[in-house]
Image (cartoon, rainbow, N blue to C red):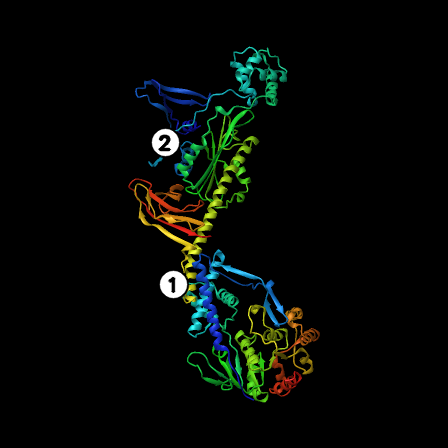
Amino acid sequence: MAILYGQITTNKPVRIISSTGGSRIFKYVLMIDIEKNRPVILDRKVQKNRWKWHGTIVEFHLEGDYPKAMPRILEYLKLTAIVNPYANITFVDPRGRLYRFERKSEEVPPPPVETLPHPHGVDVETLQRIIRSTSCTNMLNFMKEHFHRVGEQTARQFLKFAGIDERLNPKRLRPNDLVDLVRAMKSFNEFLPPDANCLSPIGEDLMRTGILKELEPRFMAVSQRKPSAYSGHPFIVEVAIAYGGKVPTRNDITLYRFANKIPLMYDESGDVSWKILRSINWRRYGVSPGMPIAVLVHLCSTKIPYKTVGKELIADIPEISREILNGIREVARRLRRYLMRRKQVERQRRRLTIFSRYLPKIATFSAQLGGLKEMPDINKLYKRQMVFRDYETGNSYTDGEAFNAEPYKTILVMAKNKHESNSVILRVLGLTGSRWRVLIPEVTLEAGAEFYEMLTKKVRLVKIQVKSAARNKPGIFEAFIDGLSE
Amino acid sequence: MERNVKSKSLDRKEIVLESLEGLGRRFCEQIDKGVFPWVEMKSRSTDNIFYSPELRQYVLGERVVRRSSRIVRHLRPFTQMVWTAYFVKELIQQRKTSTLRDVYYSAQAYDIFFKDQAESDNIITDLETVTGFPREDLNVFPEERSAVFGDLTIEYTVPGYEGRRLNLTSHPDGLMIGPALTNARLVKTGADKVIVIEKGAMFTRFVEERVYEKFNAILIYTAGQAPRSTRYFIRRLNQELELPVYIFSDADPWGMHIAMVIISGSANAAHLRDLTTPDAQWAGVWASDINSYKLPSEGLSDIDIKRLHELSRDPRYKGKLWQREIKMFMKIKKKCELEAFSRYGLTHIVDKYLPERLEELGA
């Protein structure tokens, strides 16, 4: 598509250099014969591959309105980087600016495996093509050889169902017979469902890596649905939800769509995922308008059911939309748990702030009212302890002052990185018995970021540890621990 | 006929102070024991306000609310109350007084915030409920003032005036019933009754016409609905000096109610005692007077009639006189003001109406 567009706007050939890492490198210069839809090879070279180089280089020219298209192009690259976190992407734009999307994983998902068509997904055209090239001379072998998940027994059952003689030579089927055969294939229910082994989904781990790398969310949930099939085409739906960080804040939830690891950029509102996203009552998941939330939907299939030739929007196939809906629901439920917990922590934080403001005054005025010289000790009820004050972080963990947690039921840890650019990493430990255990594992605090969390486990002492996120780039750290005996 | 009376104003302050300090010590003990300080008080919500026929006033029922500093939404009012208790304790110790508005502003100097005066007024009412003392005992007074005139000698107890005596006929405009008068000792009087008047013009007329001499009365001007310090003062005249009290107000449901609040108190003050004068009498102007004295009148408005219906169901209005007059209002559908007597000359009310009415009431 891109090459074709380049040729009709600039009439320049495309240069392709490729090698699989074997002994030779192939270099082609070619154009497309648009009428016949065939390549016209202008130049062709084969070189020795001395350095075992492998890869593909495609060079072509095309005309475009870059200032107008720029946001879309950058968005496309960002989305590509999310679903291909093992790829380094470098882009030098027409203005000479360099954009780099660095890989965050060395792991590549297994490539797709070639597979036979499933009888449910075959049309007359495909059937004709198979018959033309087959070497089988009877229908029984034909069915076994050319179709996915059809064995001897299934083939026999099917031919009986279709009323076709097992010994019939497939080349002797007439056009009308072909139509009947396709119809029978579609209505025969005993074929085993297609196997999804041929597909190459991204996988939950890589999806997490990609989202973390490009969106840096405060929360995310990823779900790979079980393989399923529609009309004989196996498919896998992968869904993710991300909250906060670099996720854009819009009135609506941001939707990122992918088909076989390709971002879909246009005609969003006609897409099945968009419709499903709209049909969900998000308030039930604790989501309110204006929250920075993105939903990612990846459809991986041997055949993506595009609605139009533009290949930008996916049709509403019941089997697929069911998987997308359930997938979104599943990650949304996990988001709800996260949001509810944040709400609870936020409520506790506000509550403790109120105690910290009023309890000392109650103590002061009670003492003066009672004509007592000494103030009563409110630390039994509520205590706020500063454990780090404007501390410059080092390359390895430093302990903060320990906080005696025993008298308190509610304990809140609050921290802030006051540095303008450097990040810090903190963790929270609790002493139970004579062992320090990690209560909150590594949390990265970017410049200016705040952190607060409630401790749920009963411990004797609590301490915070902090270090710089990057070597010799200290942050400025401040932390409090609050305890309330309620 | 002069009598010397003993005032209980001074030792009462000691009791109030002790009660406030006790509250402070209690909170400190609670904190030291690791308990979030709390206090209990009777609920002032409408479903806990009952009319007591024995006391002849509204009282609070048995329902108790606990205000505890362990509850987040109580923290602010609790802190405000502790501060207010501390503030009034200082007032009492330094023998100073303050107004409701002044308390609201003073709080800011102590880093205590009230969002408006209604909030601080409400906290003072809480403190009244907790301690059982009216705010006048806590040396906090409202702004509105009424006046008194008559043969009564008082002795000041406020700083700088201790022991100084004053006869309340000494100023023809009357004397303002403020903190100094409220806290004064009542020394002696030659009067044998108290006449309470709602309207300023009538009060002045009564002074000019020497009603205090002719009828041997102490005159009190309430300026509309009587402030609590005035109600408290009327009660003292009735209880300490054993003087009968006669109340004159406009002949309409609102005038009736001014008299009733002096007699039986209001629902708002159900948590307090000693503000009512149950033996005081509503002396006029009655609905029946409009016809018998041929007074110029106006028709009752819809709101007046609605109010009359409310009053007819009010337990405080069970008495025969009240029910009779409510019915009369409804029948003639007329109302008039105290000033209506002026139609027959400036002295008519004093020469004719007042002696007739007082005689009728057995004074």
Out of A61 and A243, give the one closest to the viewer. A243
Image disc number at residue A88:
2
Assess disc 1: are there few (<14), some (14-19) or many (≥20) residues with their C-alpha within 10 Å of its C-alpha.
few
Answer whether residue B287 is visible to the viewer in this image.
yes
SS for callout 2:
loop
Q: Which mark is residue A374?
A: 1
Considering only order in the chain, which callout, 1 or 2, is on the residue closer to the N terminus?
2
Q: Is residue A11 above or below residue A132?
A: below
Discs 2 and 1 carry the same chain letter: yes
**Residue B61 is drawn in which quadrant?**
bottom right
Q: Position of residue A372 (x, y in %)?
A: 40, 65
Q: Secondary structure at mark 1?
A: loop
Chain ID, mark 1: A
Looking at the picture, which amino acid does disc 2 mark? Asn
Q: CA distance from mark 2 to mark 1?
A: 68 Å
Q: Position of residue A243 (x, y in %)?
A: 45, 41
Please state which of residues B291 and A372 is positioned toward the viewer in this rendering: A372
